[in-house]
Amino acid sequence: DIQMTQSPSTLSASVGDRVTITCRASQSINSWLAWYQQKPGKAPKLLIYKASSLEGGVPSRFSGSGSGTEFTLTISSLQPDDFATYYCQQYNTYLLTFGGGTKVEIK
Amino acid sequence: QVQLVESGGGVVQPGRSLRLSCAASGFIFSSYAMHWVRQAPGQGLERVAGISYDGSNKYYADSVKGRFTLSRDNSKNTLSLQMDSLRAEDTAVYYCVRDKITFGSGSSLHSWGRGTLVTVSS
């Protein structure tokens, strides 16, 4: 199986900050990567697919980049609604796997 | 709009069985791969099982292979997960999830149910 490693596991930031989360794959996954946001007690929500395509209805302050084995999710100006846990997920193979998550906390 | 409603969760003793169901509506069920993704308390996400749009291909995480069986009924818009030989480590919220793209076997995960809690405990 392809292993996905996210860093950092926790991130403290303030409203207005630029935030970057990294996801690394154990082998090349081309651009078959998605990002999700999850708030406590809720199901995850798809933010980005195919590494850099923004899902409909997602604010443009979210962006994704990367290909191969290294990917980033960037929030250009952190808003109060963005404090949550973020997960990456690869779908280069049908054995879908997730990263361990990055919790974005209020500084 | 897309609706996925899970049922069947509860408390079960180790070694026993449980069957989860997911009722889908608001989209053409037979056109999309479907998955069960679970989340243990305070932990991350794990895709435990997935099935292609037509049911011809099924995929299982190593942690459940041989114990869980995934099926779908495209005539009833229903996804099911038969869970046998349950273990304490299977305790989690189980989400029913739809693929983003049509006619695939696994892609980004577009729509999620609210989840159903399975607790394995004596």
Image (cartoon, coloured by chain):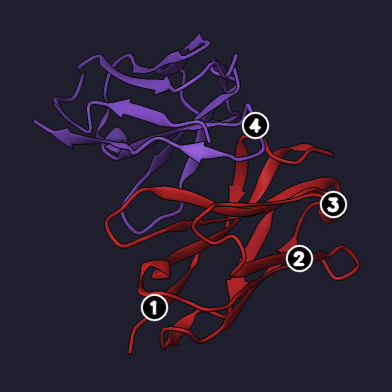
Mark 2 to mark 1: distance in Å?
22 Å
Name the subunit of mark 2: B
Q: Earlier in the sequence, mark 3 or mark 2?
A: 3
Chain A color in figure: purple
Q: Work out whether residue A26 can be spotted.
A: yes
How far apart, in angstroms, are the residues tagged by discs 3 and 2?
17 Å
Given the image, on which type of amino acid does mark 1 rest? Thr
Dot 3 amino acid type: Ile
- Residue that mark 1 sits on: B119
- Are the residues at dot 1 and dot 3 in contact (C-beta closer than 8 Å)? no
Question: Which residue is at the front of the view, A24 or B78?
Answer: A24
Q: Are marks 1 and 4 on the same chain?
A: no
Determine the CA span between mark 1 and mark 4.
Answer: 30 Å
Q: Are marks 3 and 4 in contact (CB under 8 Å)?
A: no
Q: Which residue appears farthest toward the left when viewing the image?
A: A107
Could you tell me residue B5's position as x and y percent? Answer: 62, 68
Q: Which residue is mark 2?
A: B71
Residue lying at 58% horizontally and 39% vertically, measured from the top left: A96
